[in-house]
Amino acid sequence: MTAPSPESDAGRAVWPGSPTPLGARFHTGPDGRPGTNFALWAGGAEFVELCLFGEDGAEERLELTELTHEIWHGFVPGVLPGTRYGYRVDGRWDPWTGARWNPAKLLLDPYARAVDGEFTLPPEVYGHVRDWPDNDIADTVRDNRDSAPFVPKGVVVEDGVGWPDEWMNDRRPKTPWADSVIYELHVRGFTALHPGIPERLRGTYAGLAHPASVEHLVNLGITAVELLPVHQFAHEDHLLRRGMRNYWGYNSVGYFAPHAAYSASGTRGQQVNEFRGMVRALHAAGIEVILDVVYNHTAEGSEFGPTLSLRGIDNRGYYRLQDDARRYADYTGCGNTLHVVQPHVLRLITDSLRYWVTEMGVDGFRFDLAAALARSMHDVDMLSPFLAVIAQDPVLRRVKLIAEPWDVGSGGYQVGAFPPLWTEWNDRYRDTVRDFWRGARADVRDLGYRLSGSSDLYAWGGRRPYASVNFITAHDGFTLRDLVSYEHKHNEANGEDNRDGTNDNRSWNCGHEGETDDTDVTALRRRQLRNLLSTLLLSTGVPMLVAGDELGRTQGGNNNAYCQDNEISWLDWSLLDQPEWRSLHDLVVRLITLRRDHPVLRRRAFFSGRAQSAQGLLRDLAWFTADGHEMTDGDWHSPNATLGMYLSGCDIPQRDALGREIIDESFFVVLHSGHLPVSFTLPGLPWAEEYELVLDTALEDQTGPPGTRETAEQAVVVGGRSVRVYQVRGA
């Protein structure tokens, strides 16, 4: 005889269900009826309730009595896609030992695939009494008020709905790393003001999938978009109190859920398919999708932060705590750090990553503060569990992996240290190129390494030049236009008395702080923009552009616009109607096209610098002074603002799919950061007989190639602060 099913007070059955997979999974039950299996890891908890919410907001609580390997689970018949839910988890309240269970707080399922609602952070969502008179122990006094009316809920989502025909025909571009050009953008900011996108779609995944968005990306020539965080995130309390919002999104709380505010179609699961549709549209245009992910910390912040999810499920199990277990180990600067060496935390992260690859279609990830993920117990460890798991995972080792190779803890700066499979944001590249063009470097030693793929950082362990993601600007800091217009940050609009944001901008305002009508200053600034973009797109490695830099986007000198969800951060598409900014856009197109057409600019192996001909004269890479002679050790250490770079296309160390040698044109690039013109003697044989000018950033009009030919050993005048690119003839 079969025992009756356990039921709630309202009569709803709760069957044992399964401990795997974690999260809420809709499927057919053992009796043929549809329902949803719920599974939650909550190590150390004493009691778990599943809370279901009706359309009127009424809450139904169901006890989960099945416990398998610290996973509480149950199958509930009749729970259909679109149902909103959360958990209440009970256990000891003992903050001195890190125990912070509080059943009065409704908790978001870490595996929720969709989220309905936003966090508003009133006092009721905090596990402790915020206004306790003794601040020294404020975080230790439990708040017993119900948070359910004030927090968003997870949403049951049906797997695969709406994509048997369209989604299964999706084709990933699979662009090789060496051929990649990354374009960092914000889903909302890129589309919010676009005149070609219907207003109802602006700021959404559907808006990014719109033909007007895709057309700009395709015309530009980029191969991948790197999206600022799209995991469900929360806004910080200090911003909400000032009437502001977190714009960038580096405050995750739901690692499986597309951020609901970017959905045009709805927040009861519709956002999932809308995101998938965006990925499908970009793939159809040959563009990969890389997500900027924040697994190093969560939106729950320090011990004084709200109780939204992990803190209330098992605070000690999910977060790194100090010896004083009331306090969090903070390697992120955001109040907490996920305890990635814990198996269940590592599982949460890798399950999330695999989900976004296999079911949402993304092509890679950029890991915010990746050094925090690579810490074992305290120190950064390149043999850490996280890196080891990624290296052997059959799904994740095949996608693009980008590390932001630092955190804010001791020993956290790890540029050049990540293992093969990984690429890295190369801030050494950023700083060197900025310093060269603002005239802050006495010599060109470091510049040579940065232009040629940063072999000093990456030529070990089988790593390749594309391990370096070269960038000059990113979301964090000045835009490219502001980099040549401001020497000081102007963050007053952030409401923090201009204290926030870095003071180390390595910028130069060209003689005037901020916007000006001075034609000499504005002309110099546009030339500097051309120099910076040319340097970036001609360098060996993977270039990363920031959305709007090709349009001359400005943030008015704000170098920390994380809270500016407005015109300060959004792209101003009207700039394309202004000839000087349209010209800049067209130059970027030309440079990306030049890069795409010439494999010598997309090398898959480091330059050797060794002889490439039987005569022992030509080399794959050579450096020249302004007098036309090869650089000596003394030249590298001497004060110098001019550098000539010879790139040989005659012996590229790679073959095509049929095993044939790849032969390309050779190029000669002159970079001159001095303010006065310089006479530069073009090298003679064996390097070249003749040089054809392809690009000159001293020219305001960039509508077509200059086409001028110069004979070898001829002295040419290179304009002050400019780049010249020659195609070599007759070598």
Image (tube, rainbow, N blue to C red):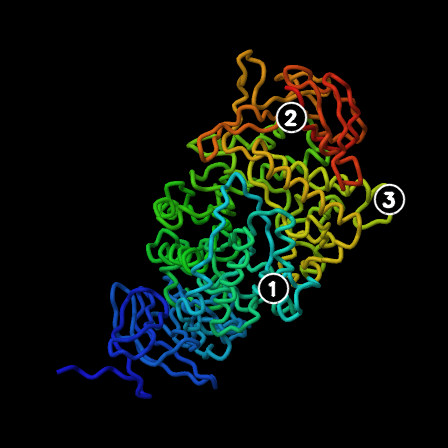
The mark nearer the N terminus, 2 or 3, is 3
Per the image, the residue denoted by label 2 is 645
- Spatial CA distance of label 2 from label 3 is 32 Å
Instruction: Say which element carries label 2.
Output: strand
Amino acid at dot 1: Gly
Q: Is residue 498 visible?
A: yes
Question: Mark 2 belongs to which amino acid?
Answer: Met
Q: Residue at x 47, y 31 (%)?
A: 655
Most foreground residue, 178 or 417? 178
Nearer to us: label 1 or label 2: 1
Viewer-nearest of discs 2 and 3: 2
User: Image check: 256 left or right of 540?
Assistant: left
Q: Give the position of the N terminus as an image quadrant.
A: bottom left
Return the mark for residue 519: 3
**Which quadrant of the structure image shows residue 237?**
bottom right
Question: Measuring 54% from the left and 18% from the top, which residue is drawn there?
Answer: 612
User: Residue placed at 43% from the left, 67% from the top?
Assistant: 113
> In this rendering, would 114 be left or right of 717?
left
Report the residue that reaches farthest toward the top.
615
Marks 3 and 1 sit apart, C-alpha to C-alpha, by: 37 Å
Label 1 and label 2: CA atoms lie apart by 42 Å
Query: Disc 1 or 2, which lies upstream in sequence?
Result: 1
Q: Position of residue 232 (x, y in %)?
A: 50, 64
